[in-house]
Amino acid sequence: MSKHKRIIGVVLLVNILLVSTHSGEFWPFSIFPMFSQTGNPWSRGVIENVQDTTRVNLWETKSIEKIDDRILPLEKYGIHEIDYANYISKTKDWNTKKINGLRSTFQIDDYPDQIWLATRVVGSLTENDTVEIKAIPMFLFTADTTIKNPNLFSQN
Amino acid sequence: MDRLFQNLFQFDAPDSIGTKIQLRIFELCTVYFTLSYTWEWALYVPRLSDVVLPLGIANYINVEIFFGDLATVNAILITLFCLIPFLFKKLRWLYAPAFLLFHLQHVVRFSQGEIPHSANMVGIALMGLGLSEIFFRNDIKKSLAFAFGFTVFFFGLGYTSAALSKLIATGITWPSGEHLWLWMGEKSIDILSLTGEFQFNWLQQLAFEYWWIATAILSIGLITELIGFLIWWKPLRPYVTLLLIAMHVGIDLTMNIFFFTFTVQLIIIGFPWNKVINRLTESISKSSTQKTVEQYLLY
């Protein structure tokens, strides 16, 4: 049993060292911090299947209820929804590489008839303790172009 | 302390058919989930183009070189390193390199910002199998019992540490109902994004309607996690396991996240299946064919 103790002790020590120096995560070691912080606003992502690119509110931030009947089901395209959510919500600098990365993830060139609007979704608690969820359009993808939301990005 | 280690590593009838079956099923489950995740990740990785958040060893090496065929090569190696020791009960030290490559496969796949935990205990179990063979060479009985206890230990530690993380990061107000509302809203967007549609179920609607129900759900979950370490003691293990499984069902109903792998692993390690099997088989006399099959499938 002393051998068992020594092994567990050493692995536990390695565990503590690794998670304490890597923000609580060094797979498979973890302090399992998910959902430990509460009340913070969150950010996710959806893809809106756009039928009419000329509509006036295309680039407006709007309530999720206004678009929830035309959301692209990512499972049909083999795309991991959490990866997409992280990509669109955590990317700070939307340079050409990042935008092309999104295009290649979606393999948009394989769907020439489709027009997809990559949309960030943010949620927060209001002062009345209700949950408010807003959709923020980011990029419009067609087979041959990518258009950035003019309200968020400068034209150059 | 000695009693704790006996609870973790000692079986009541170590040479019985029940213990052998339970330990080999534990090993089979570890190999199955390792290969299942390995190939799922290998097939997804070619879609990736950029490291968003480096995890584990990816903090020190650029894993972008694996965004292609190398992830498949890695998967082939992991497959061989798991199947050879499992099927032939030889070269069992191969579980150790399999674990290291499995870590690599994980950090390559999850370089996009998500930090999932569904495969953590599979990684721990595989690490246990690798370590056990390094320290208990050519003694499959001891090494499997060690890997089993090692996994039980980290299961208990993991749940309790999850509860402590919540109490440290937020404090005693963590279970306040509005926090659940915010998470339910967040997960509803993930499901909407995945399937194109989403509707809140009866429990979610109740939780939204009554703050105290949402608070009670979170409180029960927090307490269950906090006492997770009690799984280390054999007499308490089945009861703690039942509570943890119930908690996972609750998480699924409220937040639409089901930890399938965790639940299967809990079912295998959390109940005294060895005793049940021994009781069921004690009256059965063995034919020579049965003995041969037993010798091949077990040890």
Image (tube, coloured by chain):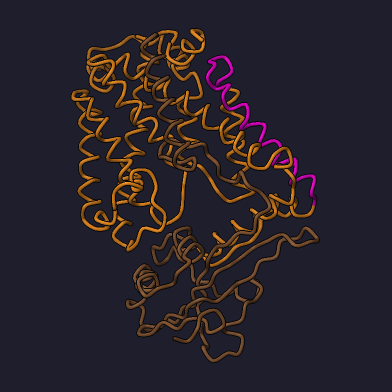
Chain colours: A brown, B orange
The magenta stretch spans residue B220: yes
Q: Is residue A111 above or below residue B286?
A: below
Locate residue A44: give its quadrant. Answer: bottom right
Q: Position of residue B186 (x, y in %)?
A: 61, 58
Q: Is residue A49 left or right of residue A26?
A: right
Q: Position of residue B221 (x, y in %)?
A: 65, 37
For the C terminus of chain B, which image quadrant? top left
The magenta stretch spans residue A143: no
At 31% from the left and 14% from the top, the residue drawn is B141
Q: Which residues are magenta?
A: B210-237
Residue B147 vs residue A41, the one in the foreground:
A41
Locate residue B56: give its quadrant. Answer: top left
Q: Is residue A117 left or right of residue B100?
A: right
Locate residue B223: give its quadrant. Answer: top right
Q: Is residue A156 above or below residue B37?
A: below
At 29% from the left and 27% from the top, the residue drawn is B130
Q: Position of residue A32 (x, y in %)?
A: 52, 39
Q: Main secondary structure of the magenta part?
A: helix
Q: Is residue B204 left or right of residue B115?
A: right
Q: Is residue B135 above or below residue A139?
A: above
Q: Residue furthest bottom?
A: A54
Residue B202 vs residue B120, the one in the foreground:
B120
